[in-house]
Image: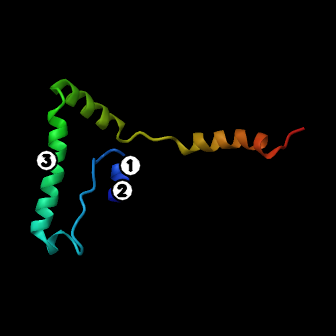
Amino acid sequence: MTATDLVNLGIVDEIVPEPLGGAHQDPDLTAKTLGKALARHLKALGKKTPEELVSTRRARYRAIGRFVELAEVAQLELVAAPAEAGGGS
């Protein structure tokens, strides 16, 4: 899985960019960048009530792992295919 995959799945909120060559190349810049991202997210979270935080967290974790059975998708495609192809009697 890539960082982008994790964002798209809702597992992480943001990809914090690293300096060219990796975080170890410029630890000071890395710390500043990470600090800004954390402050931004904490500020947003601070505007929510405890109930909102719990509700949002619960919904987020419950959504992790949801999937669609590929067999169901394939079956739907097979059912739709003859009509789309203009076939029939």
**Residue at x 66% of width, y 43% of height:** 77
Marks 2 and 1: in contact by CB < 8 Å? yes
Which of the labelled discs sits on residue 28, or is there none?
Answer: none
Marks 3 and 2: in contact by CB < 8 Å? no
Measured as percent of width and height from the top left, residue 28 is found at 9, 67
The image shows residue 55, relative to residue 72, as above or below, that is: above
Which of the labelled discs sits on residue 8, or is there none?
Answer: 1
How many marks overall? 3
Identify the residue under disc 2. Answer: 4
Q: Amino acid at mark 3?
A: Ala
- Counting residues from the start of the chain, the first of labels 1 and 3 encountered is 1
Q: Amino acid at mark 1?
A: Asn
Measured as percent of width and height from the top left, residue 84 is found at 76, 43
Identify the residue under disc 3. Answer: 39
At mark 3, the secondary structure is helix
> Which residue extends farthest right?
89
